[in-house]
Amino acid sequence: MPLQIIRNDITKVTCDAIVNAANCTLLGGGGVDGAIHKAAGKGLLEECKKLGGCETGQAKITAGYKLPAKFVIHTVGPVWKGGNMGEKEQLISCYKNSLSLAKEYGCESVAFPLISSGVYGYPVDDAFKVAVDTVAEFLMHNDMLVYIVVYNKNALAASGKLFADIAQYIDDNYVAEHSPYDSRRINNCMESIPLSETNFLDFENAPTAAIPAESFDYSTSLFEADQSLESVIDDMIDESFSEMLLRIIDEKGMTDSQCYKKANIDRKLFSKIRSNPHYKPSKTTAIAFAVALELDLAQTKELLMKAGFALSHSNKFDIIIEYFITRKNYNIFEINEALFAFDQSLLGA
């Protein structure tokens, strides 16, 4: 999918370019900056010495040297000073300029750390929102695979009230359904059923002729006797996932690109879905489209059913999806942030 949140060491991510949260000198430092310089080797420092530093919000590019990435894009994030000193605009500029450089150098994939969220003190939740919003806007007009690399998932935990609300929703819907059976409740239910000669609770010893055979009319059938299996299937088969998806896209007045980009789906995958009426998507892909199309819960379940899936309260992933859809929150990146925090698969292809 075009935007992925991953938990990894950015120096070990294999992609065309990784982004270094550098200082103005570009000569290395602590945190991500120091780790990248150490992993890349002395060649990186020697090239950086020739760049003449970098201003806050700007970006410069070098080779990757010993890193698995071809390039390192160095950008200088703002120091947090309370939020009223242009920090957000500078941080947005870091992402925009880095993405522009990646595009200029023909990169098809780029990995970002959460710029300024370490020693520079930018609040993690706010830094993440800036990163996602800026990257998402870029991806609406460009094809690129972008990673947001989080070294420790606890640093990004759909924090605050949202996290607490989701945790409570899971607890209310998941734990209750998995609590042990209450034998007293079962016994009470059994006692409320009147026993009679026709009340066959003992199935093993129930009479075999409880329903007279003559009550069935064997002269009729669901299908005509001369129908072929192929014609029966054609008569019974329903709208496929692909057909339903494309129909709803048209009904919503959306373009294909608007839909697959909102769904965080790769263009090539969408082309497969459009060209194959019988395409079977993964569950995360199907739900991603439901979110992009802003379907309600009943419509989401119907679309999922076309792909052979369902939502269940025995699955934390499903409960989180239900939480967002019932609240009409269709921000796929916010949903993915929550899924990431709860160790669940992310939406997209």
Image (spheres, helix red, strand yellow):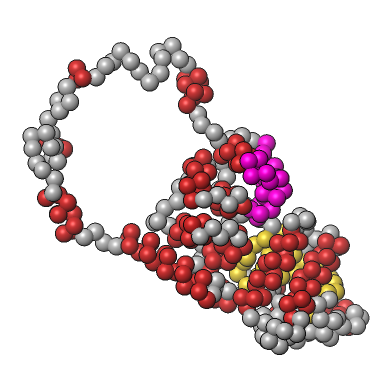
Answer above or below: position of 192 versus 211: below
**Horizontal side of residue 161 vs 221, given as left or right:** right
Q: Residue at x 53, y 43 (%)?
A: 303
In the rendering, at what x and y percent does residue 161 appear? 50, 74
- Tell whether position 178 is magenta: no
Answer above or below: position of 113 versus 102: below
Q: Residue at x 90, y 79 (%)?
A: 51
Q: Residue at x 54, y 75 (%)?
A: 159
Query: What secondary structure is the magenta-colored segment mainly?
Result: helix
Residue 141 occupies which quadrant of the picture? bottom right
**Horizontal side of residue 272 vs 45, given as left or right:** left
In the rendering, at what x and y percent does residue 190 appear? 14, 49
The N terminus lies in which quarter of the figure? bottom right
**Horizontal side of residue 208 vs 293, given as left or right:** left
The reply to whether residue 191 is in sight is yes
Q: Which residues are magenta?
A: 249-275
